[in-house]
Amino acid sequence: QVQLVESGGGSVEAGGSLRVSCEVSGDTSRLYCTGWVRQVPGKERESVAAILSDGNIEYADSVKGRFTISQDTHKNTLYLQMDSLKPEDSAMYYCAADRGWEIAGTSRKICKLEYGSRGQGTQVTVSS
């Protein structure tokens, strides 16, 4: 089982930047991807950014060019640098991990962080 503990977040004006961090511990050997999801009350959870086990990175279209996901493998820490923040980025941000979902008839997997394990979350609020 994997444990995920977020830190960072907070409040910022539109156009500003924030960074959230996540300490990853436990059994990570079977993970296919780790990253960040966000959720606003009353809305579905959204995958924001993911790092796959092969090193590839995926971003939601809504954050491409503004958010950067990275990891420090020595510290077992995941980061999400958020620049040019918009009010619509306001949400609870969760560090997440997923074992991957097999694509039927293939040997490939896809990452679905929104359905994976999550930490306790950290609030990000962007004011206009």
Image (cartoon, rainbow, N blue to C red):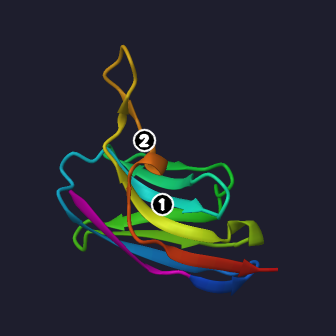
Q: Main secondary structure of the magenta part?
A: strand
Label 1 crowd bin: few (<14), some (14–19), many (20+), radius 10 Å: many
Image-quadrant location for residue 9: bottom right
- Residue lying at the far right of the rendered structure: 128
Q: Is residue 104 above or below residue 60?
A: above
* Amino acid at pointer 1: Trp
Please give the residue where the numbered disc 2 appears in the rendered image. 111
Tag 2, which secondary structure?
loop
Secondary structure beneath label 1? strand
Q: Earlier in the sequence, mark 1 or mark 2?
A: 1
Could you tell whether 74 is left or right of 48 in the image? left
Residue 95 in picture, x, y percent from top left: 42, 64
Q: Position of residue 38 (x, y in %)?
A: 56, 61
What residue is disc 1 on? Answer: 36
Identify the residue at horizontal 36%, vertical 54% (top origin).
Answer: 97
Image quarter in which the N terminus is found: bottom left
Q: Which residues are magenta?
A: 1-9
Q: Is residue 95 magenta?
A: no
Residue 85 seen: yes
The residue at the point 37 percent across, 72 percent down is 22
Q: Quadrant of residue 108?
A: top left
